[in-house]
Image (cartoon, rainbow, N blue to C red):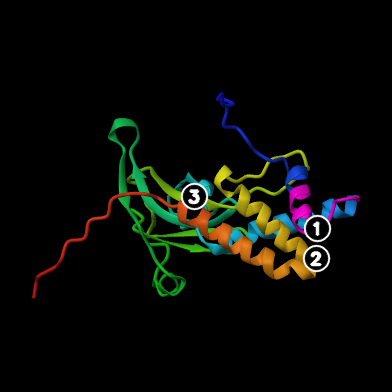
Amino acid sequence: MATSGTATFNLEFDDLIEEAYERCGLESRTGYDLRTARRSLNLLFADWANRGLNLWTIEQRSVAMVAGTAQYNLPADTVNVLSAVIRTGSGTSQQDITIDRISQNEYLFMPNKLTTGRPAQYFVQRTTTPVLFVYPAPDTAQTYTFRYYAVRRIEDVGVYTNTADVVFRFLPCLVAGLSYYLALKKAPERIQLLKTIYEEEFARAAIEDRDIASVYLTPDFGQ
């Protein structure tokens, strides 16, 4: 038997919303039905940010350090910083040096936050616009770049002909989640069923959406 030869299936938001309404035993008939579904989708994306890492939203970013400046605004779509290094030099002579993340209290207790040197520690203040603090503040001896992996927000729905800013593995989970959210408002008799399906779909997708790397454990026989 012949196969399609393609692997490009995706759902535009209007089709995704229609599928979710059908799971609720309903049809999307009015403009308000679309608007309330779009609102629920954006709230669902916020919930996913709280549930853990979404690997497709991890991006490598950088901040150019300024001598004597310890505080930098990060992009507003930054959810969190996973890991970071301080890069010195450029081209073939560049070097990435580990920098440790510290807590808010640890940064607060630094006696002189404008001490200069090569930044060795950083703190991220997770406000509406996240703020990066480094310690010590950069000196003039080198050109420093703060290189980091950021978890960014999932993009908003926007117009209904857009596709979701998710990998295809999460499409079943996305439909299941939206149908559950819609049931909370429009089909209370299906809430428990759709919630169970959603949690099962999310668990399957989350298990698959993980970094696969070898881990080696060495026992410590020291006294």
Q: CA distance from mark 2 to mark 1?
A: 8 Å
Relative to 182, say whether 105 is above or below.
below
Q: Are marks 3 and 2 in contact (CB under 8 Å)?
A: no
Q: Position of residue 141 (x, y in %)?
A: 32, 46
Q: Please tell me how crowded label 3 is: few (under 14), some (14-19), or many (20+) other residues with Cα within 10 Å.
A: some
Q: Is residue 24 magenta?
A: yes
**Could you tell me the amino acid type at mark 2?**
Ala
Amino acid type indicated by mark 1: Gly
* Residue at horizontal 34 percent and vertical 31 percent from the top: 91
Q: Quadrant of residue 26?
A: bottom right
- As measured in the structure, the alpha-carbon distance from the residue carrying label 3 to the one carrying label 1 is 33 Å
- Residue on which disc 3 sits: 55
Q: CA distance from mark 3 to mark 2?
A: 32 Å
Q: What residue is shown at x 68% (from left), y 52% (from top)?
A: 175
Camera sees residue 130: no
For the residue marked with disc 3, what is the amino acid?
A: Leu
| Among numbered discs 3 and 2, the one appearing first in the sequence | 3
Find numbered disc 1 in the image and state the secondary structure of the residue it sits on. Answer: loop
Left or right for 198, reference 217: right
Q: Relative to the observer, which residue lies in front, 162 or 28?
A: 28
Q: Which mark is residue 25?
A: 1
Residue 184: image location, x then y, percent: 76, 67
* Picture layout, residue 155 above or below residue 193: above
- The answer to which of marks 3 and 1 sits earlier in the sequence is 1
Residue bearing mark 2: 187
Span shown in magenta: 17-30
* Residue 143 makes an appearance in the image: yes
